[in-house]
Image (tube, helix red, strand yellow):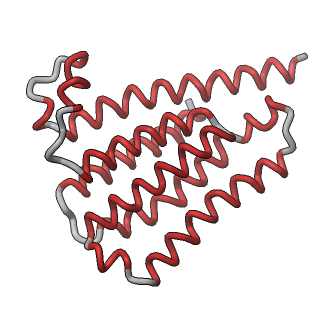
Amino acid sequence: MLALFPLIILYAGTVALFALTRENASGIAVYWGYFVPVIGLISLVTAWGNAYVRGDSRLFYLAKQIIIWGALAWVLTILHKMGVDSALGGQKAAVTLIMMTALVALLVGLYLDTKMVVYGAFLGFCGYLLADPGHSAILVKIGEPFKVVDPANKPVTMVIAVAIVAFLVAAFFLLSTRGSAASKRSS
């Protein structure tokens, strides 16, 4: 259960920030900015076993993670210093930050950690709903299997449902990696 705690933080934090961003809370981009290093740290810690299972150098793995997440932090710092967040406004700056983080999470997932692909796709889905709330027809298709009445008008409920499914898929990848590491150690 302890292995799943970082994923719980990841998905619960994203859902909470999504709800706050949707309510157009002032200064919400700052909170997303504080959450990006948390995402990077969780990515680093929870995928440590992947390097062991694949037989990769852990130092090389650590360097890749630091370079990728450090580059995102560097770009976000430059954009903040240029005043992009204040020029765009709170919600637009938050959506920009979300989409950039989703892209980085997808890239990390493709190259280093499969469960981050799932999280990156989930984060991109959240960013899409925030960027284009008028076109939430996708929620109708997603709401059908969950039996949600009028899902287009319940984006937070739908994000919670998608977060649960994404969490379960990511947990499967995490636990399968831990199982592979345990079998490698025993042999």
Q: Residue at x 78, y 38 (%)?
A: 51
Q: Residue at x 52, y 30 (%)?
A: 170
Percent x, y of residue 81: 46, 83
State the quadrant of the C terminus: top right
State the quadrant of the N terminus: top right
Q: Is residue 5 left or right of residue 52?
A: left
Q: Farthest residue in the right direction?
A: 187
Which of the pair 181/1 is nearer the observer?
Answer: 181
> Measured along the vertical axis of the image, is residue 45 above or below residue 50?
below
Q: Residue at x 21, y 35 (%)?
A: 157
Q: Residue at x 40, y 38 (%)?
A: 122
Percent x, y of residue 43: 61, 46
Percent x, y of residue 93: 33, 67
The answer to which quarter of the image holds residue 154 is top left
* Total number of numbered discs in the rendering: 0
Percent x, y of residue 178: 70, 26
Q: Is residue 105 left or right of residue 27?
A: right
Q: Is residue 80 left or right of residue 64?
A: left
The answer to which quarter of the image holds residue 108 is top right
